[in-house]
Image: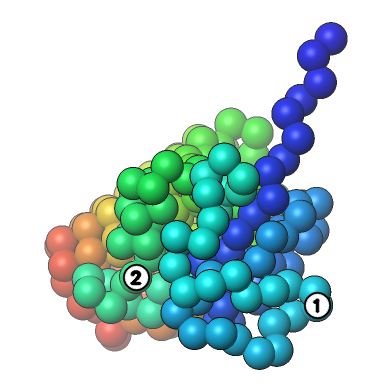
Amino acid sequence: MMQPAAKKPVVVLGGGGHARVVLDVLRAMGYRIQGVIDPKELAPLPGDVRWLGADLGCVRPVDCDLALGVGSVGVGPRNLRPRLFADGKAAGFQFVVLRHPTAIVAPDVEIAEGAQIMAGAVIQPGTVLGRNVIVNTSASIDHDCRIGDHVHVAPGVVLSGGVCIGEGAHLGTGAVVIQGITIGAGAMIGAGAVVTESVPTGARLKSAR
C-alpha cells in the first residue's frame, strides 16, 4: 500500500496578528513551519519561527507550500489577500487548507485551496467554501451556504441556511444573516449588522436592516 505523501513545510505570508493565529493552526495540524515572509523583519516572532525575507523570491514552490497570514479588514484595494493569493499561484505555489482541530465541519463540506477555518467554527452540510476564504473564530455557517473566493467571515458571524456570499465580500464581527439571503461580490457588512434582505454588489451595510 502506498504511503501518503509527507506534508511540505509551510511558509506564512505576513507577520501580524492574523499570522499568529495561522501559525497556531499550522502547529495544531502538525505542519512544520519554515518561516515567515514580510516586507520588514519582525522581532520577536513567536516560538522558533524565523523571518525569511521580504518577498516570495526567498523560497521555492518545490520546497514549501504557503499559508496567508494577512487578514482582511475591508474590501477592494484595502484587502491584500486576493493579490497575495494570485501572486503565490502565479509563482507556482500551493496554499494549504487550514482547519483548526476544534472546528466542526460536516463531511460533505467542499473546501477550496487556501481556505482557513479557525478555532470553534461550525460549518454545516452542503456548504461550499471558495478559495482563500477565512471562516474566523467561532463563526457559524449553516447548511447549503455558498461562500465565494476571498470572502472573510469574521469572528462570531452567524449565517443561516442557504446564504450566498459573492467573491471578496467582508462580513464584520458578529454579523447575522438570515436564511436565503444573497450578499453581492465586494459587499461590506458592518460588525453586528442583522441582514434580513439581499445586499447588492459592492454595497456597504453598517446598521440593522
The residue sitting at the front extreme is 58
Q: Say which residue appears at 28% left-offset and 84% top-offset.
A: 206
Q: Looking at this view, is 22 or 92 the one in front?
A: 92
Q: Looking at this view, is 186 or 53 the one in front?
A: 53
Q: Secondary structure at mark 1?
A: loop
Q: Say which residue appears at 22% left-offset and 58% top-offset.
A: 185
Q: Looking at this view, is 158 or 92 the one in front?
A: 92
- Residue beneath disc 2: 80
Task: Give the label on residue 121, or none.
Answer: none
Q: Can you see residue 101?
A: no
Q: Residue 93 location in percent, x, y?
A: 47, 45
The colour scheme is rainbow
Image: 189 above or below 206: above
Image: 77 above or below 132: below
- Residue beneath disc 1: 47
Q: Is residue 204 left or right of residue 141?
A: left
Amino acid type indicated by mark 1: Gly
Amino acid type indicated by mark 2: Leu
